[in-house]
Amino acid sequence: MAIALSLVTFSPSALAADKGHNNVIVYWTNGDQLKAVTLTCLKDPPAPVGIVAVPVYASIDENNALITVEDYYHLNGRTALTKHLEKLFGIPIDSYVHVEQDTLERFSDILGPLRLGQTNTSLAEIFEGTYVDKPVNLQWEIRSLAGSMLTPSVILKIPKLVWVYTTEIESNLQVDHVLALHGIIRGWGPDILQKQRVPGEDCKIGNRKYRVVQPGAWSQTLQAVTTPEKRLRAAK
């Protein structure tokens, strides 16, 4: 999944009247293959930084057909898919980051080994989901990764990471936006991050996997990750 780029997208100055700029869609591709899509949303701290993982095999019900996120991307392009996701989530999405596989691997090489819980791994393995052989709690994973990004050894590598971002990544976010969430996490702690995957019923038709998502699940997932946990507990 596209995890690390969702950690580098906002600054306090980004919390402007145009809230669409606080909603960032992150695309991770390998050539023509769409590998992951992630939506990151920030309200005024201390409200959570909400992160929604969008399965590329999720059906987006275009004209009552089983068209997945990945299908829509190939048929209509990144901009059109972003507009469609705006409708599903019910929010404007004015910012984007597009990460290619080679750049992800360069980031991973610069960062070097990372520690998640009891596991030694790398950024590339975290993105690929290959560092464990069982399902991972996304909230634990993103907070653990955020914690690893606050270590002195990683902070010393920020100039190299910024250079790669500015020279290799396609985005309409400037460097000040890119660096800022690191400061937000440092100030508020990794627990400010909340992440879930869009839920649905998985099925196979032929050799293709689909996730059938109920229409309201998109906005409900977004609401869940942008609602403070204390309020969620109080509502139970």
Image (cartoon, rainbow, N blue to C red):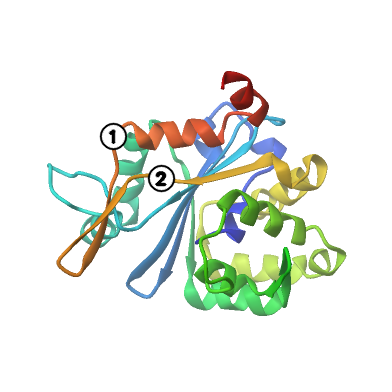
Looking at the picture, how far across and down is residue 136, in whole percent?
55, 59
At a point 54% along the width and 67% down the height, the residue shown is 127
Q: Amino acid at mark 2?
A: Val
- Quadrant assignment, res 152: bottom right
Farthest residue, direction right: 152
Look at the numbered disc 2 and give the secondary structure of its residue: loop
From this view, report whether residue 23 is shown above or below residue 5: above
Q: Is residue 113 left or right of residue 136?
A: right
At a point 28% along the width and 37% down the height, the residue shown is 214
Q: Earlier in the sequence, mark 1 or mark 2?
A: 2
Judging depth in this view, the residue of 48 and 117 nearest the camera is: 117
Q: Is residue 214 left or right of residue 143?
A: left
| Circles 1 and 2: CB atoms closer than 8 Å | no
- Quadrant assignment, res 31: bottom left
Looking at the picture, how far across and down is residue 160, in whole percent?
73, 72
Question: Would you name the residue on which mark 2 appears?
Answer: 198
Label 2 crowd (10 A; few <14 / some 14-19 / many >=20): some
Asked if one can make out residue 8 in the rendered structure from this viewpoint, the answer is: no
Judging depth in this view, the residue of 203 and 11 nearest the camera is: 203
Q: Amino acid at mark 1?
A: Pro
- Quadrant assignment, res 62: top left
Label 1 crowd (10 A; few <14 / some 14-19 / many >=20): few
Asked if one can make out residue 85 in the rendered structure from this viewpoint, the answer is: yes
Name the image quarter holding the C terminus: top right
Looking at the picture, how far across and down is residue 177, in whole percent?
65, 48
Looking at the picture, how far across and down is residue 197, in whole percent?
46, 48
Judging depth in this view, the residue of 130 and 32 nearest the camera is: 130
At a point 64% along the width and 52% down the height, the residue shown is 140
Look at the numbered disc 1 and give the secondary structure of its residue: loop
Residue 230 numbered mark, or none:
none
Question: Would you name the residue on which mark 1 appears?
Answer: 215
Q: Is residue 21 left or right of residue 62?
A: right
